[in-house]
Image: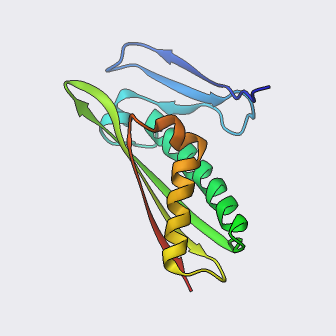
Amino acid sequence: MATVRRAMVNWEGDLATGSGHVDAATSGAFSKLPVTWASRTETANGRTSPEELLAAAHASCFSMAFSSELAKAGSPPQSLAVSSEIAFDRVDGKWTVVSGKLSVRGRVAGIDAARFSELATQAKDGCPISRALAGNVSLTVEASLDR
């Protein structure tokens, strides 16, 4: 049976001047995160956006997938620092998520930089959020190994 997670948004007003807030309905881990159109297309000013939430989902998903790939290769990570950038731009006049870029710095014993990068690419291609975006959004990963 599929695992289901829920989020909820309450929105008031039109797109340009309205506002809302998003809640993690399943976990309760966050609530009333403010969101506006301006936080998507201009300055965040303390508000989040669907793209920032997507970046958070992608970074956390990738970190889990990459730690799994490293462990399967016999080099479990001591630590991984992952960031995700989601780009939101106009394509043919419509706002679109156009790309995602993952960056990872890792502290991993018993592995060289080339293998670390290879496994990072495998994790990028295999993580469920990447798979959801595949074919629609250009995805890249930059991996660097700390010694």
Q: Is residue 114 left or right of residue 28?
A: left
**Residue 143 picture location, percent across and down:** 47, 68
Q: Is residue 124 left or right of residue 36?
A: right
* Above-or-below relation of 95 to 141: above
Q: Is residue 5 left or right of residue 92?
A: right
* Residue drawn at x 41%, y 13% as measured from the top left: 13
Between residue 56 and residue 108, name the one nearer to us.
108
* Residue drawn at x 75%, y 35% as measured from the top left: 27
Q: How many marks?
A: 0
**Quadrant in the picture for residue 110:** bottom right
* Above-or-below relation of 50 to 76: above
Q: Is residue 97 left or right of residue 112?
A: left
Between residue 19 and residue 7, name the one nearer to us.
7
**Residue 145 picture location, percent across and down:** 52, 77
Q: Quadrant of the C terminus?
A: bottom right
Q: Is residue 49 visible?
A: no
Q: Is residue 30 visible?
A: yes
* Residue drawn at x 60%, y 41% as measured from the top left: 128
**Residue 45 picture location, percent across and down:** 40, 43
Q: Residue furthest bottom?
A: 147
**Residue 118 picture location, percent across and down:** 51, 66
**Quadrant in the picture for residue 18:** top left
Q: Residue furthest left?
A: 92
Q: Quadrant of the N terminus?
A: top right
Between residue 110 and residue 59, name the one nearer to us.
110
**Quadrant in the picture for residue 79:** bottom right
* Residue drawn at x 68%, y 69% as measured from the top left: 73
